[in-house]
Image (tube, rainbow, N blue to C red):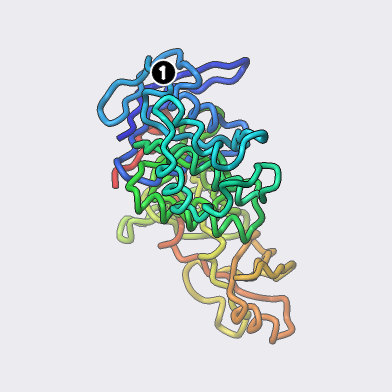
Amino acid sequence: MIRTEKISYRIGTFQLRGLSLDIAKGEYFVLLGPPGSGKTIFLECLCGLKKIESGRIYIDGRDVTDLEPRTRGIGYVPQDYALFPHLSVERNIAFGLRAHGYAETEVTQTADLLGIRHLLSRRIDGLSGGEKQRVALARALVLKPKILLLDEPVCALDEVTRQEVCAQLLKIQRQLGLTTVHVSHNLEEAFSVADRAAILHGGVLQQVSTLDKLLRKPNSEFVARFMRCENIFDAQVTEQDIRDAGTRVRIGDAELQIPGQHRGRSLFMIRPEDVVVRPALRGSEEGENVLCARLVRSRDCGGYVRVELDGPVNLVAHITHAAFAQLHGTHQPNVVAELSSENIHVLPFPGMGTRDRDSLVSEKL
């Protein structure tokens, strides 16, 4: 449905560099990245508000690179919503219909879809943040676009309203079958709506995949850290185990088994939720990839407890409240941490070859 071929755009010292991306028809696609990574610029290039310097943009098989924004069949909701404060809600929604002739039924039907029909006579300055977001969305949808572009659509909303609006966005997207590109820097927001996602950094596409693969199989240290993995280690290979298709590595005073055959140095990660922590009882320290440690800090994060462990390898673990209660009940700071080799993911070093790295950017589902 949407295909970009090596598109580039420069503004000041910043540049989008050779972005190639394929988004399927009816897919809810989330573009993630830190502030300043080029997410908004990419959306503006897609809808024609910015003219790319090189590359091509295709929508539904048609080359739209040189077409005006209004002819691309795209509905766009900017981050600030760009509503007109001097117009009523009804007139804001109908604004894009002026060239096609105003149709009251189209406005009311779209307002009904979003549950804002009762707001049609209201002025914009009297609306809440969630209501403004729905008005901006209605203005984009009333034109019946093939594609919907959403730039940080819920970033200005409180947590409860954000969850409600994300649920509504996904429901409407599924109901209308719209191909949707949603820009965000919030992982919880992405997990609530995305079929697939991409991570953009410094104008360069880092990885494209499902969120589960981005979380557990990142292709770089940057992606791993962006996906909130705090346990990333640089280790020295000590021995290859051909029988188990694994490698023994050393980090400080600890020796661990990691998957795959490696030489020299190895960079690997394990997610905090995959670190098993239990009380240090007699014999509990036996087994592969089991480390003795001290629990030095804990924080209740609502759905889990974040604990920091000090040992031969310093670790962060996310454990259940029941598991934490078991640790707390011993009244001892000494614990053991288990790092199953099945949950360890080996990362490429930053200096690996460009060809090798590019092969990791995009994965077919």
Q: Which residue was labeled with disc 1?
A: 68
Q: Is residue 309 visible?
A: yes
Residue 263 seen in this snapshot = no
Viewport quadrant of the N terminus: top left
Residue 346 in the image, given as x and y percentages of width and height = 45, 49
The front one of 148 and 231 is 148
- The residue type indicated by label 1 comes to Glu
Q: Position of residue 149 (x, y in %)?
A: 46, 37
Residue name at image x 37 percent, y 18 percent: 65
Image x and y of residue 220, in percent = 49, 41
Label 1: which secondary element: loop
The front one of 344 and 14 is 14
Within the image, what quadrant is residue 141 found in?
Answer: top left
Residue at horizontal 62 percent and vertical 31 percent from the top: 36
Residue at (64% x, 75% y) in the render = 335
Looking at the rendered structure, the number of numbered marks drawn on it comes to: 1
When asked about the image quadrant of residue 78, the answer is: top right
Label 1 neighbour load within 10 Å: few <14, some 14-19, many 20+: few
Please, is residue 196 above or below residue 56 in the view? below
Image position of 365 (left or right of 233)? left
Q: Residue at position x 59%, y 37% from top?
A: 81
Q: Is residue 36 left or right of residue 58?
A: right
Q: Position of residue 103 (x, y in %)?
A: 41, 37
Residue farthest toward the left in the current orientation of the protein: 61
In this rendering, position of residue 259 left or right of residue 238: left
Q: Nearer the viewer, residue 95 or 259?
A: 95
Whether 203 is drawn above or below 146: the answer is: above
